[in-house]
Image: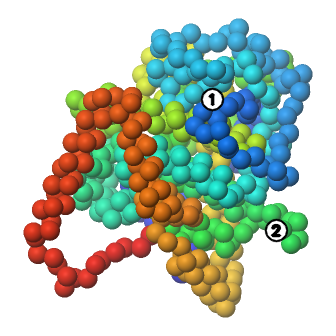
């Protein structure tokens, strides 16, 4: 492992930006976001953490002290941001509203939203995202369920084996670069690859926060765990790339949302000073987003099946937001809800709202969506700062210490069996029968919801079988060896 631990350079795939640009602006971005999320508007969040898990009954509950969470009394929340006031100005929508117990979604939404009839208030400054001790089968089941919503069949291995795109600098070259995968375009179209990157990038950011805010069980002290970072992130460069990708995606959404953010009333206590400071921080963040948020959303969801693919994308991501109700750790569940809502809001801004809808007079976004989006961007920026800190820690190690850590990481990776193609390999793999069971369950769910999609799946399975059989009659190529690329 080299002295430039997790150092990335050059263009970032599926964007018009590079790693150097993001790193050059992140300090300023982090400082402004850090101040922004401390303001009254962005620090208070209402969420219902105790809705029933819709996917399984026996979700575990974390008894560790680190999982506990602190609520705030409603009287401590500025009056105009309380549920009663929000319900009175609940934005009308051009979309049909689909209600479930305690939550709903509109046609344009990529997530389920709380209906504000239940739930507590949280001061996000009092519940930092960090190591909680929540782990084991319950946590693994949640992540596996999230990745199973990636029914497109993509994985880290798929993306690593594809050819990287050529460097791009002009918008009119983006489409060609984005599709330069070296693989069948139907099997790995751009939208499906973006979906996987968004999920994996979010997972990476959460892993980095856990490793950077780690509880030493021996000393009781909190601090960065370099071995944890190397095992979970640095040993898998693709994961770190997706963190940068998510940051660019979120910055692009902020850039598009600028007219709404600039026209919002952030005054909460009658003090114009709060409002002025919030606008100052936002102005700086918007300026950065316009410089670094180089992502062309117009190249996605095009063609004759665009609407079908977008609905499929939405359905999967909505289900991911519902899976958050199955997380057994209160603190993890809160931040899971915030960050999945934050990403879902960014996706809605990019792919559902036109310029008219993004005018200062627009009321198509709830306050909770704006708060979630900016706090999620802060989490990503904070993760990038943590990566810088881990790099510094690595450089400061002497040769013998770095050799020990590298050896432990190698042994940890070698000790693990191959991961399921849909999950990060820090999750234990299921056996073949378990994987088959999950695959059949996913197919059954699709067939139950849509006959057309069901026929499509079996058609694909048929042609895959035909292709597999045809390979048998081709030269074996044994002289080249089995050829397997490790993650």
| x, y percent for residue 247 | 53, 48
Name the residue: 20% across, 55% down. Answer: 465
Name the residue: 33% across, 37% down. Answer: 300
Residue located beneath label 1 in the image:
370
Decide: few, some or many residues near mark 2? Use Cα within 10 Å; few <14, some 14-19, many ≥20. few
Nearer to us: label 2 or label 1 = 2
How far separated are the C-alphas under marks 2 and 1?
Answer: 35 Å
Name the residue: 32% across, 53% down. Answer: 168
Which quadrant is home to the C terminus?
A: bottom left
Q: Nearer the viewer, residue 143 or 297?
A: 143
**154, above or below 397, in the image:** above
**129, above or below 235, in the image:** above
| Quadrant hosting residue 277 | top right
Residue located beneath label 2 in the image:
216
Relative placement, left or right, of 476 versus 245 is left
Q: Secondary structure at mark 2?
A: loop
Answer yes or no: is residue 153 visible.
Answer: yes
Which quadrant is home to the N terminus?
A: bottom right
Name the residue: 73% across, 17% down. Answer: 117
**107, above or below 333, in the image:** above
| x, y percent for residue 363 | 57, 15
| x, y percent for residue 52 | 68, 31
Q: Nearer the viewer, residue 289 or 398?
A: 398
| Residue contact between numbered discs 2 and 1, judged by CB atoms under 8 Å | no
Decide: few, some or many residues near mark 1? Use Cα within 10 Å; few <14, some 14-19, many ≥20. many
Q: Which mark is residue 51?
A: none
Q: Secondary structure at mark 1?
A: helix
**94, above or below 157, in the image:** above
Which badge, 2 or 1, is on the more N-terminal residue? 2
| x, y percent for residue 124 | 78, 39
């Amino acid at each position: 492992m080299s002295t430039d631990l997790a150092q990335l350079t050059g263009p970032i795939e599926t964007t018009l930006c590079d790693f150097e640009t993001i790193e050059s602006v992140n300090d300023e971005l982090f400082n402004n976001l850090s101040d922004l999320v401390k303001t009254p508007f962005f620090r208070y969040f209402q969420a219902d953490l105790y809705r029933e898990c819709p996917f399984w009954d026996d979700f575990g509950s974390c008894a560790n002290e680190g999982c506990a969470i602190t609520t705030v009394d409603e009287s401590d929340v500025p009056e105009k941001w309380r549920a009663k006031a929000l319900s009175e100005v609940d934005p009308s929508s051009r979309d049909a509203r689909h209600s479930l117990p305690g939550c709903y979604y509109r046609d344009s939404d990529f997530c389920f939203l709380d209906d504000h009839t239940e739930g507590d208030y949280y001061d996000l400054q009092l519940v930092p995202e960090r190591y909680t001790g929540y782990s084991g089968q319950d946590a693994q089941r949640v992540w596996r369920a999230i990745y199973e919503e990636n029914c497109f069949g993509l994985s880290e291995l798929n993306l690593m084996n594809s050819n990287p795109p050529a460097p791009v600098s002009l918008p009119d070259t983006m489409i060609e670069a984005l599709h330069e995968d070296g693989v069948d375009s139907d099997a790995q179209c751009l939208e499906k690859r973006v979906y996987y990157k968004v999920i994996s990038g979010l997972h990476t950011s959460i892993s980095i926060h856990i490793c950077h805010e780690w509880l030493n069980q021996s000393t009781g002290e909190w601090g960065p765990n370099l071995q944890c970072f190397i095992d979970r992130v640095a040993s898998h460069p693709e994961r770190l790339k997706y963190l940068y990708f998510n940051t660019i995606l979120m910055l692009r959404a902020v850039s598009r949302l600028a007219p709404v953010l600039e026209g919002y009333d952030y005054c909460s206590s009658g003090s114009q000073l709060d409002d002025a400071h919030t606008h100052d921080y936002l102005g700086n963040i918007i300026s950065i987003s316009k410089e670094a948020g180089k992502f062309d959303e117009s190249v996605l969801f095009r063609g004759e099946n665009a609407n079908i693919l977008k609905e499929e994308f939405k359905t999967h991501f909505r289900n991911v937001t519902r899976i958050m109700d199955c997380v057994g750790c209160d603190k993890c569940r809160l931040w899971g809800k915030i960050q999945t809502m934050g990403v879902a809001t960014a996706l809605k801004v990019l792919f559902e709202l036109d310029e008219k809808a993004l005018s200062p007079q627009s009321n198509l976004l709830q306050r909770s969506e704006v708060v979630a989006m900016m706090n999620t961007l802060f989490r990503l920026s904070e993760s990038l700062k943590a990566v810088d800190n881990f790099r510094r820690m690595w450089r400061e190690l002497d040769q013998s210490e770095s050799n020990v850590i590298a050896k432990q990481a190698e042994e940890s990776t070698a000790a693990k069996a191959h991961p399921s193609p849909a999950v990060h390999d820090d999750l234990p793999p299921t056996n073949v029968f378990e994987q088959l069971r999950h695959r059949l369950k996913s197919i059954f769910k699709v067939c139950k919801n849509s006959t057309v999609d069901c026929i499509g799946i079996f058609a694909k399975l048929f042609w895959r079988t035909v292709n597999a059989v045809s390979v048998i009659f081709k030269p074996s190529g044994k002289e080249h060896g089995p050829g397997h690329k490790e993650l």
